[in-house]
Image (spheres, helix red, strand yellow):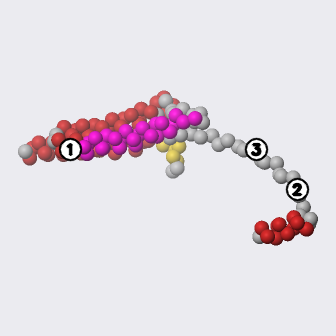
Amino acid sequence: MSHIVHDLIASGDARVVEAPEAAPRHRHETDRNFGLPTALYGATVAGYFGFLLVVGSAFANPALAIPMAIFVVFIIAGFGVPAIWTRLAGNTSAPQTMGEFEARGIQTHTGRLAAKDASIQVLILPALLVVWGLAVAVIAAVVR
């Protein structure tokens, strides 16, 4: 292919044209806040740490120190990295306040959710983990 182009240039048959004007670049508005208020993320993190606190205190053992520390690091990384991501340059949006969230809810892929429904979906797993941790701790205390 390049051999043919070089032959055209050498023979003088190539036509030189001006480069086309570049189309203006449209900046895409970046929203990295996920649409939920910060309080819901805080409650989720509190639920995960609550589970670790219940299980760690119920089964206090020096052998569990390293696994518990790894879980803490994973939770901090899992919520810390997105928190840093929301503060990157170019993110002009802010997370919803609780008032805005209660008034508008959140738009999901399958439709709009009211604040109560979205909160239940976000907090159900951490709440169930805390209840499960409490149940396991009570069972372990009864069996001992």
Residue at the disc numbered 3: 24
Alpha carbon distance from label 2 to label 3: 21 Å
Alpha carbon distance from label 3 to label 1: 58 Å
SS assignment for the magenta stretch, majority: helix
| Quadrant in the rendering for residue 70 | top left
Going from N to C along the chain, the mark reached first, 3 or 1, is 3
Q: Quick one: which residue is furthest to the front in this view?
A: 10
Going from N to C along the chain, the mark reached first, 2 or 3, is 2
Residue at the disc numbered 2: 17
Residue at the disc numbered 1: 64
Question: Does residue 124 appear in the picture of this structure?
Answer: no
Q: Is residue 61 left or right of residue 75?
A: left
68 inside magenta stretch? yes
Q: Residues within 10 Å of mark 2 (few under 14, many from 20)?
A: few
Q: Is residue 61 left or right of residue 81?
A: left
Alpha carbon distance from label 2 to label 1: 72 Å
